[in-house]
Every structure is written in structure tokens, then in C-alpha cells.
Image (cartoon, grey):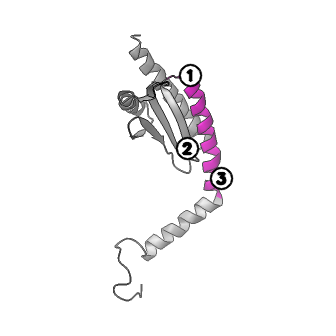
Amino acid sequence: MTWPRGSHGSTFAGNPVSCAAALATLELVEGGLMENAVRTGERLLAGLRKLQKKHACIGDVRGVGLMIGVEFVKDRETKEPDHDLVVDLEQLAFSKGLLLLSCGASVIRVAPPLVATAYDADKGLEILDQCLTELDGRKNGE
């Protein structure tokens, strides 16, 4: 840390600890986490597309790697967003151990950590399916 005064303008960037953490992170990403993100992301996308065929409320599934968006609609033809369903889904999934994050009008962002496994993906898909089935049952008065 022999930089002259004024050459560094951030409290947390560029210090030895931050640099060491960044280098360790790059080592992990290049050492297999990137491939894992591709593999697990493909598994999640495939599973979410299967759920889309099963649940009419899923209007779109899109993403790359482990950054996936699932759009929920009231009607696939009109593509009217179903914000209320997303709110209910977040709460129900949380009660079953699955943390979901909404974004936009009616999208759930699926963004697990880079270390997510096939088991994690499958378990998340299973819980999501259970929640959607339960919410559909509530909507239909079952």
C-alpha cells in the first residue's frame, strides 16, 4: 500500500484483502465453477421448461447459466403479468425452504450460487412444482 495520496478513491477496492479475495474467486471460477454454472443452469432451464408445460401460469422461461427468469402470467395469450401469484409464490416457497426473489412485474429470478449442485437444482424444481400445484388448487377452490 505505497500508493501516493489521491491515486486510490475507494474504501474497499484495491486493498490487499480485497485483491486476495478477488484472485481466490477467479481461481475458483476458472477451476470448475464456470462449468458447473453451465451444467446446472442447463438442468434448471430444462426443468423449468417442463414445469412451464405443466403449469399454465408460467408464461416464459429465459436465461443463461445460473441467471434465469421465470415469468408468471394470468393468461399466456394476453401475457398479462400475474404479480399477485408471484407474491404468493415467494411466501409459500419460503415456508417450504426455497428462497425466491421477484423482479419486474411478475418474474421470479432464479440465481443460485455458483456451487449449486444437480441435487440443489432438482430439489428447488420439486419445491417450485409443489408450490405452483398448491397455489393452483387454492385458485380453483380445492
Q: Which mark is residue 115?
A: none
Q: Is residue 104 visible?
A: yes
Secondary structure beneath dot 2 equals strand
- Spot occupied by residue 115 in the image (x, y as percentages of width and height): 56, 50
- Spot occupied by residue 71 in the image (x, y as percentages of width and height): 47, 34
Write down the residue under mark 3: 35
Please tell me which of labels 1 and 3 falls first in the chain: 3
Secondary structure beneath dot 1 equals helix
- Quarter the C terminus occupies: top left
For the residues labelled 2 and 1, say whether their Cβ atoms are less than 8 Å apart: no
Mark whose residue sits in front, 2 or 3: 2
Residue lying at the far front in this picture: please name it: 78
- Spot occupied by residue 32 in the image (x, y as percentages of width and height): 64, 56
Bin the neighbour count of mark 2 within 10 Å (Cα to Cα): few under 14, some 14-19, many 20 and up.
Answer: some
Please tell me which of labels 2 and 3 falls first in the chain: 3
Inspect the image, locate mark 3, and give the three-letter code of the amino acid beneath it. Glu
The residue segment tinted magenta is 32-56
Write down the residue under mark 2: 63
Residue lying at the far top in this picture: please name it: 142
Question: Compared to 5, does 49 lie above or below?
Answer: above
Inspect the image, locate mark 1, and give the three-letter code of the amino acid beneath it. Lys
CA gap, disc 1 and disc 3: 29 Å
Write down the residue under mark 1: 54
- Quarter the N terminus occupies: bottom left
Residue 13 image-quadrant placement: bottom left
